[in-house]
Amino acid sequence: MSSFPWLTVAILLPIVGAAVVALLPKREPGAALPKQVALGFSLVTFVVVAIVGLSFDVGGPRYQFTETHEWIRAFGAFYAVGVDGIGLVLLLLTAVLSPVVILASWHDGDGGRWSVNAFFAWMLALEGLAIGVFAALDVFLFYVLFEATLIPIYFLIGGFGGPRRSYAAVKFLLFSLLGGLLMLASVVGLYVQSAKTPSGPTYLLTELSKIDISTDVGRWLFLGFFIAFAIKAPMVPVHTWLPDAADEASPGTSVLLVSILDKIGTFGMIRFCLQLFPEASKWATPVVLVLAVISVLYGAIAAIGQKSIPRLIAYTSVSHFGFIVLGIFVLNSYGQAGSMLYMFNHGLSTAALFLVTGFLISRRGSRFIPDFGGVEKVAPVLAGIFLVAGLSSLSLPGLSPFISEFLVLLGTFTHNFWYALFAVLGIVLAALYILLMYQRTMTGPTRPEVAGVKDLGLREVSALAPLLVLIVLLGFYPKPLTSIINPAVADTLQQVGVQDPKPAVPASASGEENAQ
Amino acid sequence: MSIPLAASAPVIDPSPASGVFNLLWVVIALPALGAALILLLGNRRTSGFAHLLGCATVLGSFVISLVLFVTLLGRDESDRQVGQVVYNWVDAGSFHAPFGLLYDQLSALFLLLITGVGSLIHIYSVGYMEHDARRARFFGYLNLFVAAMLTLVLGDNYLVLFLGWEGVGLASYLLIGFWQHKPSAAVAAKKAFVVNRVGDIGMALGTMLFFATFGTVSFAGISAAADRADDLTMTFLGLLLLLAACGKSAQVPLQSWLLDAMEGPTPVSALIHAATMVTAGVYLVVRSNFVFDHTELAQTAVVVVGAVTLLWGAIIGCAKDDIKKALAGSTMSQIGYMMLAAGLGPAGYAFAIFHLLTHGFFKANLFLGAGSVMHAMDDDVDMRHYGALSKAVPVTFLTFAIGYLAIIGIPPFAGFWSKDKIIEAAFGDNLVVGLATLVGAGITAFYMSRVMLMTYFGRKRWEEGVHPHESPKVMTIPLMVLAALSALGGLLIFGDWIVDWLAPVVGPEPELHLGVPTIVLTLVVLVVVLVGVAVAWLTVGRHEVPRTAPAKVSFATRAARADLYGDAFNEGVLMRPGDRFVEGLVVFDDRGVDAFVDGTASSFRGMSGTFRRLQTGYVRSYALSLLGGAVLVVLALLAVNIA
Amino acid sequence: MSGSPFLVLSAILFTIGCVGVLTRRNAIVVFMCVELMLNASNLALVTFARVNGNLDGQVAAFFVMVVAAAEVVVGLAIIMTIFRTRRSASVDDASLLKY
């Protein structure tokens, strides 16, 4: 492996880009230069991350591209970055979505509270920080970046969105800060634990997972992390910030928020809750699983009843995050592999859904479902993409989310039949919320208000095309992702100390052979 | 039940594909490619050639299927199962599901039916959809439908089957809602998809239970280990698969989507009812014979569902004035026959498939014929506006008549052979079940005769300005081919060919134990059928048919018109309370959970409003509180030190 | 040598200063009372230095003196400014900095 600091470059590039975009001379709204510069930086970042992805050695050591530099000696904090399969998948997601979002949000920064430069600068800053979060191998570094991501998203929601954006931004911030505070307590607790060891305090993940934490302390520390991540994810009952945020934010911001930032929650559960506190994770499993199943059903049912499109999508995400958490905590290889795939696939499908409905909403000037009807007639391409995005959200086989959802359910089933029985109802509810929305907005006679809606233009289609291509491609050929996820799953489960349940009646040798 | 359980179901053990069998994946790939091309390029760009492309791909698949079938025929009986792994699809932890295909005696027959009848429907659609601006897209969807169905029957494991299963659901959603500017079509499409999804719960849980039990989802692996599994698991598996089959095959209690699905263009109905979609449930049960052979309870459940549905559909068919809905009722009923046969175990599997094939022929024939009639009558579907059409559309009439004779089971037409076998098997199993099939045959004869009489005979009751005309050749030639197949389809049973052909997949047929010689039963069935025809003649043929449906009718008729209150039940028991629940939850989320959050925020705001009053601005009061604080600290220190 | 007389004196001075701060309104008087308290604590510090026989307390006393001097400079300047604008040296009149 080359010693070139690819990950640091991937983190710094967008942040430098953000500074450049912010310093560009302020022009009148609609100026193209800041957008082009931002797009350029995000594309270069994508190339860098793609290089990381392509040169990732599947059979190699768990963490690759590692860089470790001492940061604050007294705390034992390091600047330590590196990726394993889990981090890499989310890194790729971030790098793919950022240019897509920038391209799709071309005009969304024009009417904001601040200049268009600020809009794109914050987006780039967010990308850099998110990459840092997913690459961090040091708990302290992770915590700092985790909190730092709140700043750009706060300004993105509060500066560029609907009429109640201030309310939504503050609500989001308060929820996140509450979680962050609990996590800070646990981070400090970790310091106390590691300082007791002979080698002195450290926040390095690899070192921390070796130290011996007593059962009680482990459970309390676990709770601090878990609640923070559950708020971030978000799980019922700490989810109400998301619908408001999605409702008020611009579509691009919603994508960054739901598809990337919220993944930090579930990513953190795997990376920190499971790896640092295996005992506590097993202890908490029943409660977490019940909450996850409630999230699945609650989010789906609430989605069916929504009138506003972005709110509806936000609730579907609550349901989907329920699935992800379910897969993580059933503690078997299919469930976890499913969850990790789910994070990526959900990012794609929700992004496509938010963006395409965003285009629709900006054309009609309303986000309420009853204001639409018969759009298919006037904008068939938009309707088609909407349908594909919707179908991917309801996990249609052949589209990538199906595989992840099936694996999560499979993992749940082998863990405990009853959880699976309730969670599987989610697939019927998903069909209802997506198809009802499609039916009410796209089909039927064309309403006079939408008669003037134009079909998608070249820029919009080219922004969405990569997402749709990936959704279909990974639906039929998920191997590029599963091959990097599988070793990470195996490592995680080994660390937790669990094994897959054995089948009751293993198929004979010939059957096994056939199945391989 | 008295069926002796087979000692063990046959084990699926395919040999790797070689020679011409390497083309297996092309059978799916061709229509899939057609669909992808047409749908990606869009309606406008492909409108010049989409119909040709659509037909060509399916015909290509048909030719390959034919070649494969002939090659398979030439092979030794022990060597007629071919497997092909296209690539590794899902690999996660210890879960593996390859994109694997299995070509055996069962899927060979399905391939021929799907591509053969599918091709005819494609060709027919060229004429039927000629004036529709979105014809190109229609062909894209049709191709997608065929590709999905082929995936369903070719998959060598339950996950690939599931892929095809849902693909079929998607294609039917798109096609039923093809005229989506009509709200009724959009609603029907959504209903079909959602009801199917309820069935998919069974499919998904079943697949998971397979994996949890056997550690694999491949047919080969499961069939090899099935003997060692415990009965309870097998019963659960059987019931879950039955739930799945009910959804896709429109069996009671998940039957309600099928009649609404008539909102789609008529060729779609033909495709759904004859070659694809509804047959999937029967395929699933027959394919999973290694499960059902181990569980009497699940088999009984299949038989009961089949028997109920066959009567349910038949009764609905009697009261419908919409020609397509009458035929849809009949499909439900005929699929009920197949289900029932499949539930009888090895005694019925082969006959279920046999009836499925012949039904594919004559139902496609009937639906396309109905489409031809609608074409002639300016898309009017109300049979009360028909009458005396036998002269106006002679080719359609003749082909429809052959389909009619086939479905009611008049020898020597195809339906006679297949339905008779099922009735025999049913009587061999259980008197009640046998009687259900017998009564069903009578009702079938009644409602199909009613359709015949109302459409082609009697006096003209046409709407003003309607000038019926025969359809173009591109539509009538498929009708003729299908009529020929409906007439000759019975040949498959000669020398017990189909039974022997399928025996390696579904197990040999056990000997039939009837109290009477089979010829007696056959005659009884024929008599019942003739009675049904006679009743139809007495009630419909002899009298003038009113142009509007009479409102004063018996309760039975009203119930049948309302689809035996299936929709009313769903509406009252599921949808209304469901809506109420959704509303309740949204309110709870808004006024409960979120209000708690907002309440916390505003309580802090209120508290801060109170506490800020402490900032009086008077230096002396600050000094006093400072002193108080200092005293407190000192006291605390003292207390600690003294204690 | 016993330090208690000095400590008692220190406590008395401190209390006088304290009561003065709390009860007087004239800013100058309050200020003088603050100085009184500081000096009372200085006395205590010096006493303890003497009792303990090291220089720590005396060093601290010097610190306090320096701080007190700096405080006088700033404090008197503030009082002067307030007096100029409000024509009053009463601390109760300068109560604008409130909720």
Image (cartoon, helix red, strand yellow):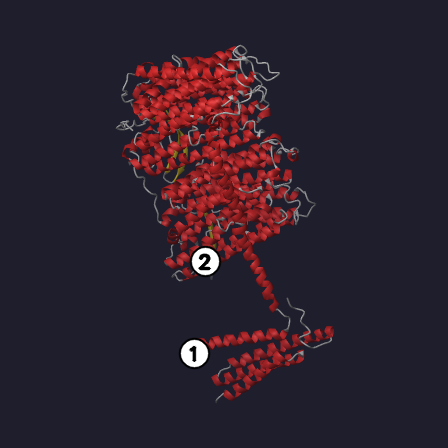
| Count of residue discs | 2
- B587 left or right, relative to A450: left
Q: Position of residue B543 (x, y in %)?
A: 50, 15
Q: Is residue B367 positioned above or below A404 on the image?
A: above
| Quadrant placement of the C terminus of chain B | bottom left
Task: Please state which amino acid type lies under the numbered disc 1.
Answer: Ile
Q: Is residue B461 positioned above or below A267 on the image?
A: above
Q: Chain of mark 1?
A: B
Same chain for mark 1 and mark 2? The answer is: no
- B639 left or right, relative to C78: left
Give the residue displayed 60% in from the left and 25% down from the top: B44
Give the residue displayed 52% in from the left and 29% down from the top: B174
| Quadrant placement of the N terminus of chain B | top left
Give the residue displayed 60% in from the left and 49% down from the top: A156
**Secondary structure of the residue carrying numbered label 1:** helix
Q: Position of residue C67 (x, y in %)?
A: 60, 76
Circle 1 residue? B642
Find residue B233 and name its label: none
